Image (cartoon, rainbow, N blue to C red):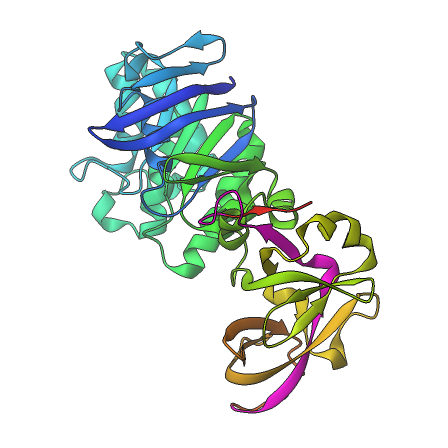
Amino acid sequence: MASVTYKNVWKKFGDVVALNDMSIEVEDKEFLVLVGPSGCGKTTALRCLAGLEEVSDGQIMIGDEVVNDIPPKDRDIAMVFQSYALYPHMSVYDNMAFGLKLRKFPKDEINSRVEAAAEILDIHQLLQRKPKELSGGQRQRVAVGRAIVREPKVFLFDEPLSNLDAKLRVQTRAQISKLHQRLQTTFIYVTHDQTEAMTMATRIAVLNYGVLQQIDTPQQLYDFPANMFVAGFIGSPSMNFFDGTIVAENDELFVDLASFKIKVPASRKEIYGHLVDQKVVLGIRPEDIHNPEFAPPSIISESVAAMVDVSELMGNEILLYLVNGDHNFIARVDPRTRVEMGQQITVAFNVDNMHIFDPSVDPKNPVVVR
């Protein structure tokens, strides 16, 4: 078991900066998920840790040992790839045992490790089959089993579920979470799917253009995003954003959004007071926009008129695509809501959970105001 540390790590491919001064400390036995859009640097970070890419600057440590110059085979890590990377001519047993055979482990030791891993993953009955005889989910479990038999200090997962269908992805996600609890080993997992990140991680590191945006627990990232990128990336459907201006009227503060205004709660007036007459971005999640008829009684809400553009019945909820002036936004409302396309309705914004972002420092990625 071991911790992992990225210390001021840079990775450049010519003029392209894939990792920009990244520093992360992964605790022993933690399940850290690196998440972000394609090209954000998450897979590069994993490959640098595995030794498949050389860092341009900075240090990577496993435990107390700097591994920059240590060959991949000596880093005591095991990696599960998106493509499974199984040998098609070998049986499942031989695929799982292959790495141990290369390291000249005793036959009895190899057999016991493979049997134990197969038992954990419930693939004991598949050991004599070839990869072509397996489903996608079974192949993925074999790839994970090949990593388990290594008994490494750190497990690395590079988008292992992206080739699976939706139902199987959910099942395998749960299996990997249970596997982490059972093995009590450090897991570092890369995905572009924020749902995977939210449901599996001890902590999530959000990357964009090689820059670490925020690292925290899933709930903290959801409740307290550091900037607009994190706020928009975490959550599905993503947070609604409205360009506006903070204005003061009759000793009250409002966010003026041109076609409507949102009153700032009394508890936030002091926080936002210095932003009067400044351009801001208001953010609110779809689940904080309610049908007033079914809104929780305890929330502080502001009524907003809107036209229903599209309605999507999901069974346990309804997603309403709404229009007000130049603003298009999404509400996640109670399934008992009855509306028609083109209908004018009123929705309730839960202003307790709204976010205000200040674009004055970085217009492309405004920071949250707290």
- In the rendered image, residue 260, in percent from the top left (x then y), is placed at 64, 75
The residue positioned 63% from the left and 65% from the top of the image is 287
The residue positioned 27% from the left and 27% from the top of the image is 12
- In the rendered image, residue 4, in percent from the top left (x then y), is placed at 48, 20
Q: On the rendered image, what quadrant is the C terminus found in?
A: top right
Kindly indicate the quadrant of the structure image that contains residue 17. top left
- In the rendered image, residue 81, in percent from the top left (x then y), is placed at 31, 37
Q: Is residue 150 visible?
A: no
Q: Is residue 367 visible?
A: yes
- In the rendered image, residue 18, in percent from the top left (x then y), is placed at 31, 33
Q: In this view, does 221 lie above or below 260?
A: above
Kindly indicate the quadrant of the structure image that contains residue 98. top left
Q: Give the range drawn in magenta.
A: 342-365
The residue positioned 24% from the left and 16% from the top of the image is 102
Q: Does the magenta stretch include residue 358?
A: yes
Residue placed most toward the observer, 355 or 314: 355
Q: Does the magenta stretch include residue 44?
A: no
Residue placed most toward the observer, 227 or 199: 227
Q: Outermost residue toward the left?
A: 89
Q: In this view, does 174 lie above or below 259?
A: above
Residue placed most toward the observer, 51 or 187: 51
The number of numbered badges drawn on the structure is 0
Residue placed most toward the observer, 111 or 307: 307
